[in-house]
Image: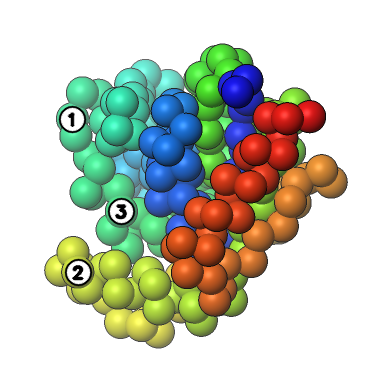
Amino acid sequence: MKKISIAIDGFSSCGKSTMAKQLAKTLSYIYVDTGAMYRVVALAALRAGVMESGEVDLDRLKECVKNLDINLDANAKAYLNGEDVEGEIRGLEVSNWVSKVSAVGFVRERLLDIQRELGAKKGVVMDGRDIGSVVLPDAELKIFVTADADVRAKRRYDELLKKGEPATYQEVLDNIKMRDHNDVNRAVSPLVQAPDALLLDNSYMTIEEQNTWLLDKVNEACNK
């Protein structure tokens, strides 16, 4: 079977990363979690005090991202300047800022070349917010994932509880609604469904149903 590039976009907490990682493993493809890259930038900005005023200080953010070394290993674990930050970037504080940081044009430009270089090779599954529309517009298979906000909040809340992260359900729901609004309305690369992307609403799908749907679409795309 020929190898293709697969772009998976969609709203936060739809399980895109887990879905993409499992799909890549099943297909023996490379998995690229672009959302983790933006989370690393948000973490670095928080550490540098970029948001001390309660807003993103663009001058300080530009200085912060200038020399960042962002890497993902073979298991898509995120590293900031050589430090394993996978656990820290998944916390609620980073989640509260990642949409605003990722909306900044020079941040997206900084990461776009890295992402395109990774996606240029076939046999790649990449997920994020603008993969099918901007990063990999020529991907052979594009999928746009959505789910009800309440369903997504419950999933995310349960995930945080398992990790021992302090959060309430309402905080998580508010965070998801805020990120949805920011992602859809940002001026640079807003979250949109590419015209040729397939819509996947996984609100009430089981993992098995979702995996079957995905593999069917991959097979169809590979046989074109």
| Residue 129 in view of the camera | no
Residue depicted at x 32% and y 44%: 43
Mark 2 or 3, nearer chain start: 3
Between marks 2 and 3, how big is the CA–CA gap? Answer: 12 Å
Which mark lies nearer to you, 1 or 2? 2
Between the residue at mark 3 and the residue at mark 1, the CA separation in whole angstroms equals: 15 Å
Residue 5 is left or right of residue 126, and the answer is: right
Camera sees residue 75: yes
Instruction: Find residue 178 and report its horizontal and vertical position in percent.
Output: 54, 69
* Circles 1 and 2 in contact, beta carbons < 8 Å: no
Indicate the amino acid at tag 3: Arg
The three-letter code of the residue at mark 1 reads Glu
Q: Secondary structure at mark 3?
A: helix
* Mark 2 element type: helix
Which quarter of the picture shows residue 142? top right
Choose mark 2 or mark 3, whichever is in front: 2
Q: Residue 132, position in %: x, y?
A: 69, 38
Above or below: residue 43 compared with residue 116:
below
Name the residue at 46% across, 50% down.
19
Q: Please report whichever mark, 3 or 1, sits nearer to the chain's N-terminal start.
A: 1
Name the residue tied to disc 3: 90
Image quadrant holding the N terminus, namely top right
Residue 44 position within the rendered picture, expressed as x and y whole percent measured from the top left: 31, 38
Secondary structure beneath disc 1? Answer: strand
Q: Earlier in the sequence, mark 1 or mark 2?
A: 1
Q: Dot 3, crowdedness within 10 Å: few (<14), some or many (≥20)?
A: some
Name the residue beneath numbered marker 2: 162
- Taking the spot 42% from the left edge, 38% from the top edge, the residue there is 26
Q: Nearer the viewer, residue 90 or 99?
A: 90
Q: Which residue is mark 1?
A: 83
Count of numbered badges drawn on the protein: 3
